[in-house]
Amino acid sequence: MSITVVGSVAYDTVTTSYGKSIKQLGGSAIYFSIAASKFTNVYPVGVYGDDFDNSDIKLLLDNSINISNLKKEKGKTFFWEGVYDNNDINSRKTITTDLNVFEKFVPELDNTSKKSDIIFLANINPELQLDVLNQCKNINPSSFVGLDTMDLWINNSIESLNKVIFKSNVIMIDQYEASALSMVNNLKDAGLKILESGVDFVVIKKGEHGVLIFNKDYEISIPGYLTNIVKDPTGAGDSFAGTFFGYLDKIGNEYTSDNIFIATVLATVVASYTVEGFGVEALLKLDIDSIYERYEKYLKLIGQRTYISLDNLKSKLDI
């Protein structure tokens, strides 16, 4: 079993009320891959520059992440700098966005990554997402496809984006982007309308307030995990996605309501750990025991003791 994720590799400089972290490892493909690697094999597809540190290559390898589809190009790695509002951690101001080598990125996948059971299309140009889908579906037509997107593509590339949505199984989308895509404000109406686009699942992320999931047969609503240490929200959504799909891949891609629920809880837990450190530092320290410890606390918090059994979870994960 394996997952292929196509997205950005980046260095970020982030300022929050906890301080400033300069040129920390980031990017959607990186956060997703580290989270997914806790559960399954993962193949990130992306590009980095001459300035990408050898220690970061080692970091990926030490976490059993296959880097054969990460390309080195002449130039600098994608760079982003942002400052989060001290009074509202959900609000941030972008200081700098330098695409650098990512500007001309064209995904190239080897045959092994094309065969992955799950393909996750992180937040990149829908034309590139379509290209990846064409490459993968020609090799493995039954691959399960997850999709992330943003307001830039909703506003400027909606025709291409709709084509990607139609070919995807799951769309993960921020609550504000869900309203923009569906053109309705009520999130339940938005989720149900997006379902009509052809996807099997719509996952609407509400940040610290939790997640809504819509399927034609059921709906799931869970709150966020309560943490009072939010050092850096960057990458929380991508680590959520990596965990969600990593778990589903590990258990054999059985998309029942129970498994979707457990995947969502585990993803919420891992994302809550992610925000407690700058960049990927907290994510790197996680093991299955620390994930389960918070998983158990969270289920008690929301009154879902049925799912708590450690033996049941370990059986599903084959550990």
Image (cartoon, rainbow, N blue to C red):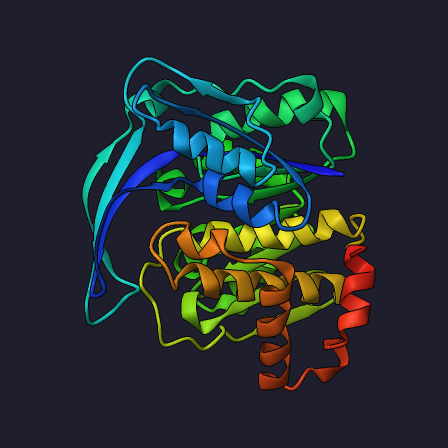
Report which quarter residue 278 is drawn in: bottom left
Residue at 47%, 45% (x, y): give it.
Answer: 31
How far across and how far down the image is residue 217, in percent?
Answer: 76, 65
Left or right of 312 on screen, residue 207? left
How far across and how far down the image is residue 273, in percent?
Answer: 47, 63
Camera-nearest residue between 191 and 203: 203
Camera-nearest residue between 139 and 65: 65
Residue at 57%, 22% (x, y): give it.
Answer: 68
Report which quarter residue 256 is drawn in: bottom right
Say if residue 158 shows up in the picture. Answer: yes
Q: Is residue 158 above or below residue 216?
A: above
How far across and how far down the image is residue 89, in percent?
Answer: 28, 66
Q: Residue furthest top?
A: 74
Instruction: Classify the position of the C terminus by image quarter.
Output: bottom right
Q: Is residue 71 above or below residue 319?
A: above
Residue at 44%, 41% (x, y): give it.
Answer: 28
Camera-nearest residue between 14 and 192: 14
Instruction: Classify the position of the N terminus by image quarter.
Output: top right
Say if residue 125 shows up in the picture. Answer: no
Left or right of 129 on screen, residue 264? right
Report which quarter residue 193 is drawn in: bottom right
Residue at 52%, 75% (x, y): give it.
Answer: 223
How far across and how far down the image is residue 230, in percent?
Answer: 34, 67
Left or right of 235 on screen, residue 144? right
